[in-house]
Amino acid sequence: MVVFQFKQLSLDVLAHQWSHQVKEVEQALLSSTPEPRLSASLPVQVSIATPGIRVTFDAATSNCGFGTVGFVFFDSIGGVIGAGARRYEAISDPYVLEDLGSRDCILDCCRRGLRSISFCGDAKLIIDKCVARDAADNKIGALLQEIFLLLDGMDVVDIQFIGRIRNRAAHCVARHALLLSPQLFARFDFCSWLRSRGI
């Protein structure tokens, strides 16, 4: 809301007030963005030297105008040790959702203290852009730059394209998240659900 006052203010004062209001709006937007819904047996902090963690991601779209992303954590022998998903209202572009999925996946690794990961997905274009550090894209360039900054903060990152078959777990999480109501989504245990299906 803009309030007009009938007193003369200098341009410096107006600029300061304006920048303060912009910062408040940015903080409100950032604090209202929910973290991905994650269920995992991973501890909150994992040793930096934890070897062999592989993280896969995928996205799914609905015909109702929203989309979901899913990501799965594997240990060095291929066992599922964590899984999560995020729902994006009013975003149904698969390309944008895949990029959001890759960003969410890496962001969750950072939050958990994982500094050495193998990052895998079946979105070849996004994986290729991450490997080449190529953010030249009108649609997702800003998201790619955010991903590159997150990756630069890690010690070791192996980025790999994997086909749909090898990405089955993340694909199943993303597809199943589409079916959940927002209320059920908020408390759903994706890791237990994957394990119960032997995925």
Image: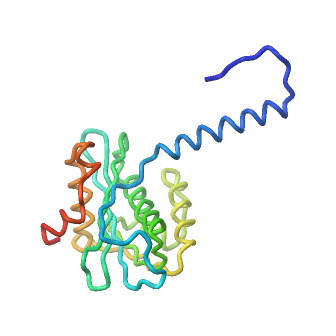
Position of 15 with respect to 50 (left or right) is: right
Residue 162 percent coordinates (x, y) = 31, 74
Camera-nearest residue between 26 and 166: 26
Residue in the picture at 53% in, 75% down: 154
Residue 176 percent coordinates (x, y) = 20, 55
For residue 188, what is the image quadrant? bottom left
Quadrant in the picture for the C terminus: bottom left
Residue 112 percent coordinates (x, y) = 44, 69
Q: How is the image coloured?
A: rainbow
Position of 187 with respect to 150 (left or right) is: left
Quadrant in the picture for the N terminus: top right
Count of numbered circles on the image: 0
- Which residue of the protein is positioned furthest toward the top in this rendering? 6
Residue in the picture at 24% in, 65% down: 191
Residue 31 percent coordinates (x, y) = 51, 45
Compared with residue 38, is residue 110 higher up or lower down, i.e. above or below?
A: below
Residue in the picture at 49% in, 77% down: 115
For residue 118, what is the image quadrant? bottom left
Residue in the picture at 85% in, 19% down: 8
Compared with residue 79, is residue 108 higher up or lower down, i.e. above or below?
A: above
Camera-nearest residue between 129 and 19: 19
Compared with residue 50, is residue 65 higher up or lower down, i.e. above or below?
A: above
